[in-house]
Image: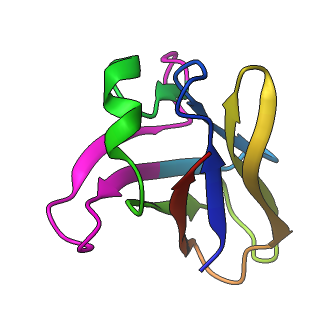
Amino acid sequence: MPGLKIDSNGKIPMVDVIVGHAQMGEYSLALWDDNESNPVSVGKGDSADDIEDRFRLVPTRDDLAALQDHTLSWVIFIKRLGRGRNQPYSFEIRITQDDEERVSVKKKGRLGSSLEIFDGEWKIELT
């Protein structure tokens, strides 16, 4: 599992979700404790509304110290808008802290069906 290094003395990390190519994306992100249980929602939404797809990883800086060995998981559903197969899609999920990218996942391709599901996770390591 890829790692996510976070500075426990830095600013609160931010999560950005970007969906491109005129497709619809619905997503959710969750923090799991060091036993990989008890998930807490970090953010969820879709790319079709006017709400910014940017979230704080935790509510306060005091919460950063408790993140060692936690896992941040994500799932995104990309839906085809319009007709026709093989439409292009792209998305990125990016974590930044102190204006530096800590980790990201970028995917692009062509939709083989009307709905594609992608997921992943990062193990958190405090520095």
Depicted 91 relative to depicted 47: above or below: below
Compared to residue 118, the image places residue 45 above or below, namely above
Image quarter of the N terminus: bottom right
Q: Residue at x 27, y 45 (%)?
A: 41
Q: Is residue 98 above or below residue 21?
A: above
What is the quadrant of residue 86 in the picture? bottom right
Identify the image's colour scheme: rainbow, by chain, secondary structure or one colour. Answer: rainbow
Q: Nearer the viewer, residue 31 or 86?
A: 31
User: Residue 94's x, y, as percent?
Assistant: 70, 43
Whether residue 62 sits left or right of residue 94 in the image: it is left
Residue 71, picture quadrant? bottom left
62 in the magenta segment: no
Quadrant of the rendered structure where residue 2 is? bottom right
Q: Is residue 51 visible?
A: yes
Pick the residue in front: 23 or 32. Answer: 32
Residue at (27%, 73%) from the top-left corner? 36
> Looking at this view, is 113 or 8 the one in front?
8
Task: Tell me: residue 56, above or below residue 122.
Answer: above
Q: Is residue 80 visible?
A: no
Tell whether 70 sits left or right of 80. left
Residue at 56%, 24% (x, y): give it: 9
Q: Position of residue 116 (x, y in %)?
A: 58, 74
In the rendered picture of this protein, how many numbered marks are placed on residues?
A: 0
Given residues 81 and 51, the one toward you in this image is: 51
**What is the span of residues highlighted in magenta in the rendered image?**
27-52
- Residue for point 51% across, 57% down: 124
Pinpoint residue 48: horizontal percent, then vertical percent. 54, 32
Whether the magenta-drawn stretch holds residue 43 is answered as yes
Specify the quadrant that holds the C terminus: top right
